[in-house]
Image (tube, rainbow, N blue to C red):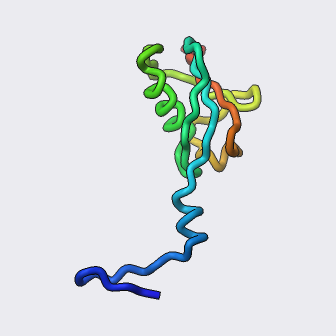
Amino acid sequence: MEIMIGSERNELLSRSIRWKISMSIPLYGFLEGDTVGLLVLAEEGQTILDVARKLQDAASIRVAHREKVDVVYQGKAIDPKLTVNQAGLQALDRFDVIWSRNL
């Protein structure tokens, strides 16, 4: 189905497709040096590094931002270039952002 908006033609997406595209995944993030865990909304296609930065931004009033961090999920450091989906994170999973120990 197509609709006209002004002189532009836009194709309508089915409700189920729009839901999948715009669905955020709530994750519990814990930042080293912070006193509380935070709920972070991530998209499936976002990189782990982007999610780590989002957590740091949310906690910036309490914890100074650091460039070199590691992300730990299920007790293991994960590649920051992976997407949330590729890393296997699901709704309400916990991840930890720790200061990188690599020099």
What is the residue that sits farthest to the bottom in this orientation? 1
Residue 24 placement, left or right of 54: right
Residue 54 sits above or below residue 33 on the image: below
Which residue ends up furthest to the left in the rendered image? 7
Above-or-below relation of 68 to 51:
above
Q: Residue at x 64, y 25 (%)?
A: 96
Q: Residue 83 in the image: x percent, y percent?
A: 59, 46
Residue under the point 52% across and 58% down: 22
Q: Position of residue 1 (x, y in %)?
A: 47, 87
Determine the image quadrant of residue 3.
bottom left
Q: Position of residue 10 (x, y in %)?
A: 37, 79
Query: Quarter of the image holding residue 17?
Result: bottom right
For this orientation, the residue located farthest to the right is 74
In depth, the one of 90 and 5 nearer the eye is 5
Q: Is residue 17 left or right of residue 1?
A: right
Which residue is at 68% across, 44% downward? Answer: 91
Q: Could you tell me residue 58's position as x and y percent?
A: 46, 27
Residues 75 and 60: in front is 60
Q: Quadrant of the C terminus?
A: top right
> Where 25 falls versus 30 (above or below)?
below
Q: What is the quadrant of residue 31 in the picture?
A: top right
Q: Is residue 22 above or below residue 5?
A: above
Q: Residue at x 63, y 37 (%)?
A: 27
Tell how many labels. 0
